[in-house]
Amino acid sequence: MRVESRFKQVLALLLVFALVAAMAVGCAQPDEPDEPDTDEVEVPTIDFRAAMVTDVGGLGDRTFNDGTYEGLLWAERELGIEIRALESNEIADYEPNIDQLAAAGFDVIFTVGFLMTDTTAAKAPEYPDIVFGGIDQFLEDPGPNEVGLLFKEHEAAYLAGVLAGLVTLDQDFDERVNDQNTIAFIGGMDIPPVERFEVGFIAGAKSVNPDVEILVLYAGSFDDQARGRELALSAIDQGADVVFGVAGLSGLGSITAAQERGALFIGVDVDQYLTVEGSGDVMLTSAIKRLDVAVFETIKSAVEGTFVGGQNRVFGLAEDGVGLAPFHDFDDAVTQEMRDAIEEARQGVLDGTVVVPETRDEL
Amino acid sequence: MAEPSVATRGQKIAHLLRELAVPVVSVMLAMGIGSVIMLVAGYDPLVAFPAMLKGAFGGGRQIGETLLRATPLMFTGLAVAYGFRAGLFNIGAEGQLFLGGLSAAWLGIVLAGLPQPFNIVMMLLAGAAIGAAWAFVPALLKAKVGAHEVITTMMFTYIGRYIVSWLVTGPLKAPGQIPQTSQLPPESTLPRMHDLFGFLAVSRVHLGFVIGVLVAMLLWWVLKYTTLGYEARAVGLNPWASETGGISVPSTTIKALCISGALAGLAGVTEVMGVHYRLHDQFSAGFGFTGIAVALLAKNNPLGVIAAAILFGALSAGAGTMQLEAFVPTKVIFIIQALIILFVAAEQLARWIIGRTRRVGVEHAS
């Protein structure tokens, strides 16, 4: 009798465990971007395989790992290839993940993130028949099977800065805009691609609002949501009403902070209005990098045999490789003046009259 | 006369089995619940676990990878376990590890050109010393004013991490764009096992693993047979009784936490010397914290730490293959790790299940 009831207790406990854990998994599951129904045309599958190795943020960061995966999904849809993503939990995973994909016969491997630069350079020569695409990586001496895929983040950030600089001045824009004339930049790690975002943002904001104060904070990692939230809270408490978050998974915490304390947010890498569910009330726009374009084009050229390695390709405004996402819920709030200022900045960058700085030294 | 000794041996084995039962059952329960989670999430555990096993033990290279990942966990596991034995919760192994790594990254460059065995010994000693030093202030605060080590060692972890962060992005940064220190010369690195022993399969596992096993054995001996270890255990069991018995609790506390810090420092040294050959901001994947789980699973037994570290290393090494072949996100291993800890912590649950199976077994036998 006693044993029976104890058994039921334990069973109940185990079920609770299972339930809680299942919920945790459900929440942790990357919302893999829905594949659009492409039933109309059945693309014949071909024997070609492309994969990516994520950085430690992993899939579900709603920024650059997911952005790269978008490109793979696009290639799967359009070219009928097989795709795969392998997540790194720690830096020590980079090498074995590449080895595993190579052993499994993949034709193209994308290594995602600046921190994998050295690993790409070390591993690519070992596998001369595999095409390596290094996202956000400037490869010093790329071999014929390597291509570095870089973005002019500063150009997208410049446009975001113009918008932020004007919004923070305009208290009629939204009740969350205050009179402090302060905006904030939250970075993940202080590495060149993030620095380009920071510097471009500052330059853009100052170009339209020379007196604006810009708080710059770094989380120290791309996978610490709590820290991202903390930093954004402190920035908002110091008067920032527009927060630009360039921090991968850590940035998701900053979005939460903006929602909690009533500030506006500018997303990064992908249109975060679409990728971060329920963020519409704060998401002014996003400074996007067309990772999907870079990935898709690389795979396509490899499939068609037109791949040219040994180079670093840079995607900027001119190549449609970076830009601003739509304003979505703020579409009515964004004034014609703001739109004109952004367009003017865009034209300036395109025709070379505006040169956006890339590093703090150039600022 | 032979009879009693056989009996004691039998008792010893029975005791050992009892000690092993809880961790083993906990791991099995964790795998079971992990399977349920996979099923709920739409993955097939019958594909996933074999794939993980293959990735962790499927060949020489895979076994090497498992041992490679077990190495830092062994040191941090020993660090936490030794602290626990003395009644101290060194939650700050991560910080001591970072300082150890820092010392190796710096000393390795300074010692360039000297013979490798000399460098290895010097760098290990220096890393242990700085790890101990980093634990010394919290230890002193604990011993003198009773400041709780959970708070102080954690705070020191932040200080250590940010010092390293500043150094690798500033004063110690190597030329180039990446925030990291310069690469160590070969004479300042730990050789890979297959370079030392040609008959071993090519893999990344390095001498650090062997050092870890030796340190674990040394620690086991210290705890069991030396005054130092006896005092630590006594204070851990009952500080008031120990004080009455003539053991200085403050001095034992300081010694124990410093030894714990030294062990954690070694984790940082071996990672820098054996895996990365340089220091960067994120060279540790939270090894100091996973070490707590390893120590718990090992029930703070130094020899048990070896096995627990290998298990956690296998989970980590097998995760990639699991994702490649079964499409299960590698993050699932964190869930399994967490479940293991949960079940080890909820020891009563495992004990009850063991008791029940034994009863059933007895009934069947009779």
Image (cartoon, rainbow, N blue to C red):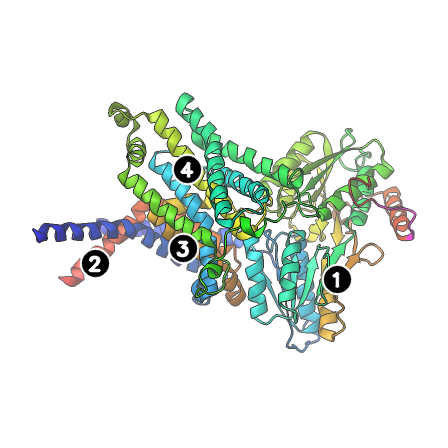
Q: Is B205 displayed left or right of A314 in the figure?
A: left
Name the one closer to the observer, B136 or A250: B136
Q: Three-letter amino acid code at disc 3? A: Leu
Give the chain of mark 4: B
User: Cβ–Cβ below 8 Å for labels 4 and 2?
Assistant: no
Q: Earlier in the sequence, mark 4 or mark 3?
A: 4
Q: Mark 4 — residue?
A: B260
Residue drawn at x 30%, y 43% is: B221
Residue receiving disc 1 = A293
Q: Which mark is residue B360?
A: 2
Q: Which residues are magenta?
A: A351-356
In the rendered structure, which amino acid carries the disc numbered 1?
Answer: Val
Amino acid type at circle 2 is: Val
- Is B136 left or right of A296, judged from the image as shown? left
* Residue indicated by mark 3: B311
Task: Please identify, in this view, whether the residue under mark 3 or under mark 2 is nearer the observer.
Answer: 3
Q: Position of residue A284 (x, y in %)?
A: 75, 44
